[in-house]
Amino acid sequence: MITKITGLMTPRNFFFLLFNIVTVIIFSAPLRELAGLSRKSELYSHILLIPVISGYFLFSRKRELFSAAQYCYTFGPLFSLVGIILYFISLNQGARLNANDFMALRVFSIVIFWSGGFLFFYGIRSSRIAAFPILFLFLLAPIPSVLVEEFILFLQFYSTEATHLLFKVTGVPILREGFTFHMPGLSIEVAKQCSGIRSSLALVITSLVAGELFLQTGWKKLILVLSAIPITIMKNGLRITTLSLLGVYVDPRILGSELHKSGGIPFFILALVFMAPVLLWLIKTERKDTGGSAKGTGGREQGVGGRG
């Protein structure tokens, strides 16, 4: 174990470790605020996991990273300089931004600064190998408020549509007014809190990690990530419909119970179940594509041999 650690602690890695320590010290104030946000906000409860996941992918590729490593004296410092400039811009514009956007801009600039340091110590080739864990770190930054609001409205609208469709399938008599459904003895509003943005974000992050672990093709990874949106909408519709039917036919108090307030975990697991076939299908098609190209190569090699 000591030999392995000694082998990892090359001068390059040692100075990069020092760079990481200095980065944490310099930006300790916003990083502490970010950790506090992760503990307080349910939307950003995933933040503390981001560097852990990114670190795992970096460590799993250490051989390729170290074998391709070379200093980059131009783009590395340039990236870090851009990060510093953005950080000072965020401080200058802090009074004009709300707390969420102020934090987002600062964290975004810190990640750019750190990325420049990685690029300086390990070079362009290693940075390409580490592209996913580096880009994944940008998920540390809170989502700008404007995008959050637009995405919530998007999910609210289509979750209402999914709920309406499910009510029709079940045959429950309803009257719809916008985001509100009137049923016998009960009215249900699909509020912004029902948009499922937290589970949607968690599902997107899960799909990013799963795609990187199990898929090779970029566009298939994208399909997996994009599938998180309709799956979230389907999951929201099922949750709202289920709780509504329980409220109408079992007990209206269910709608004010913990099952309504904190019952998202079973439905998130259901969303993962919905995503599993998509992932398996993409893996299967990728294997077919790989097998097909291999067979094609084999056929071409035989043809060359025949002509010889």
Image (spheres, helix red, strand yellow):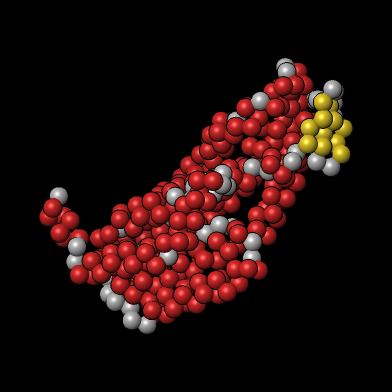
User: Where does residue 8 sit, x and y in percent of width and height?
Assistant: 20, 60
Residue displayed at 63% across by 68% down: 95
Residue 128: quadrant of the picture: bottom left
Q: From the viewer's side, name the closer residue of 8 and 230.
A: 8
Whether 163 is drawn above or below 150: the answer is: above
Whether residue 140 appears in this view of the structure is yes
Q: What residue is at 49 percent from the left and 56 percent from the top?
A: 33
| 240 or 128: nearer the viewer | 240
Residue beneath the point at 61% across and 42% down: 231
Above-or-below relation of 262 to 303: above
Q: Count the labels in the image.
A: 0
Where in the figure is residue 266, as x and y percent of width and height?
Answer: 56, 30
Residue drawn at x 51%, y 75% is 88
Q: Quadrant of residue 27?
A: bottom left
Residue 168's spot in the image, x, y percent? 79, 31
Q: Residue furthest left?
A: 3
Return the x and y of residue 122 as percentages of the image width and height: 31, 71
Residue that extends furthest to the top in the rendered view of this protein: 250
Lateral position of residue 240 relative to residue 270, left or right: right
Quadrant containing the C terminus is bottom left
Quick check: 157 left or right of 282? right
Q: Is residue 270 visible?
A: no
Given residues 22 and 46, the one toward you in this image is: 22
Q: Find the residue positioned furthest to the bottom.
A: 74
